[in-house]
Image: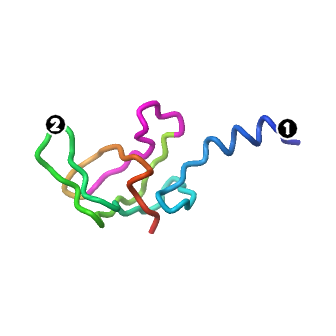
């Protein structure tokens, strides 16, 4: 049986997109606004899809999604700038 503490911990580890949908490993998401890439002159345009995402539940810097974007390579995104497709 789950105790109240375990249930609260599970709810904290749930990662949601900008619309409040729960994200899971392997989902496809779309970027909801243009993002500048640090250390580069590249820009990720609104609507760009990231397929096969991996969630990072204990991310300290807020970047809780690891993914590959076509033409850009591997990078990390914040769940607040994506929506589930």
As measured in the structure, the alpha-carbon distance from the residue carrying label 1 to the one carrying label 2 is 45 Å
User: In which quarter of the view is residue 21 placed?
Assistant: bottom right
Furthest toward the right, the residue is 1
Q: Nearer the viewer, residue 74 or 76?
A: 76
x and y percentages locating residue 61 in the rendered image = 41, 33
Q: Kindly give the residue lying farthest to the left in the view shown.
A: 41
Question: Percent from the top left, x then y, of residue 57?
Answer: 53, 39
Q: Residue at x 18, y 53 (%)?
A: 43
Residue extending furthest toward the top = 60
In this picture the colour scheme is: rainbow
Q: Residue at coordinates 50% horizontally, 62% vertically from top-left?
A: 19
Question: According to the image, label 1 marks what residue?
Answer: 3
Looking at the figure, which quarter contains the N terminus?
top right
Q: Residues within 10 Å of mark 1 (few under 14, many from 20)?
A: few
Q: Main secondary structure of the magenta part?
A: loop
Q: Is residue 1 rendered to the left or right of residue 9?
A: right
Q: Which residues are magenta?
A: 57-69
Residue denoted by label 2: 39
Residue 7 on image: x %, y %:
76, 42
Residues at discs 1 and 2 in contact (Cβ within 8 Å): no
Horizontal arrangement in the rendering, residue 65 relative to residue 20 (left or right): left
Q: Residue at x 13, y 41 (%)?
A: 40
Q: Which quarter of the image is occupied by the C terminus? A: bottom left
Image check: 74 left or right of 2?
A: left
Numbered disc 2: secondary structure: loop
């Amino acid at each position: 049986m789950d105790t109240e503490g375990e249930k609260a911990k599970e709810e904290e580890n749930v990662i949601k997109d900008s619309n409040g949908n729960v994200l899971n490993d392997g989902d496809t998401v779309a970027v909801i606004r243009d993002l500048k890439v640090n250390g580069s002159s590249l820009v990720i345009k609104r609507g760009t899809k990231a397929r096969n995402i991996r969630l990072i539940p204990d991310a300290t810097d807020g970047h809780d999604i690891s993914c590959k974007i076509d033409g850009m390579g591997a990078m990390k995104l914040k769940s607040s700038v994506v929506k589930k497709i």
